[in-house]
Image (tube, grey):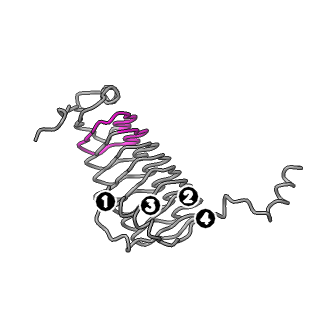
Amino acid sequence: MSPPHPVTTIDLAETSLRELNQTLHRAGQGSFRVLNPRGTHAVACGIDADIRVEIDGSVGYYCAGMHQEGSVHVDGNASTGLAENIMSGTVRITGSATMSAGASGGGGLVVIEGNAGARCGISMKGVDIVVGGNVGHMSAFMAQAGNLVVMGDAGAYLGDSLYEADIYVRGAVESLGADAVRKEMRPEHVRILSDLLAKAGMEADPADFQRYGSARNLYNFHIDDVDAELAGTAS
């Protein structure tokens, strides 16, 4: 069966990055295949139409940044800031990502089939991130909403200063960050985790995961602090 739209192939060995991204921004539909990325930064950034982009090879910084619609599939690894500020749609890589994957994402789904480095999901605001391997230290730092699923282990200070995001880890956690605690896995969390694993195309038993979240001690007002607050106001 033929695809609904022809696939447009763009070779970065012959086409500039600016031309590539302009082509993707002008497209309202269709599928695109990008050849020879060779670690180029900012590939397929700012896509806001329901298009499909397949990248044959590894990419550099901020691939699929500010992604708003459609899908980006990277057959390789990605450097810092993969899918930073993603708002919706899907970004998937078959390899591993370095630092800050999915940073500040407000929605959508990021799938990393390999490992993710430090600060994966930092300041996430609604994005769902599924990592097939391990995540580095300070992952989900100041995470405000969304879900981080880790099939492997998590590095030190997981979920430091997080707000209302949920973190699901199947492996070991080196240490939890400030205000992060292990929480009960209720039926609704099992449903959410099962749905995310299915969307990511990863097979695992939700019963093997532990859930972590905020103890809510860092951002709630405590009456015991009122004297210090008043003293600060008067000074």
Which of disc 3 and disc 4 is earlier in sequence? Answer: 3
> What residue is shown at x 45% (from left), y 66% (from top)?
188
24 vs 67, left or right, is left
Give the vertical position of 217 relative to 30 (above or below).
below
Indicate left or right for 14 with 212 as reference.
left
The disc label shown at residue 164, or none: 2
**SS assignment at label 2:** loop
The rendered magenta stretch, by its main secondary structure, is classed as loop
Residue that label 3 marks: 136
- What residue is drawn where x is 43% and y is 46%? 81
**Of callouts 1 and 4, which one flags the residue occurring earlier in the amino acid sequence?**
4
From mark 1 to mark 4, how far is it between C-alphas?
A: 31 Å
Q: Which of marks 1 and 4 is in front?
A: 1
The numbered disc on residue 122 is none
Q: Viewer-nearest of labels 3 and 1?
A: 1
Q: Earlier in the sequence, mark 3 or mark 1?
A: 3
Whether residue 46 is in magenta: the answer is: yes
Question: What amino acid is found at the position of numbered circle 1 in the picture?
Answer: Ala
Q: Position of residue 184 (x, y in %)?
A: 51, 73
Identify which amino acid the numbered label 4 is placed on: Ala
**Label 3 residue SS:** loop
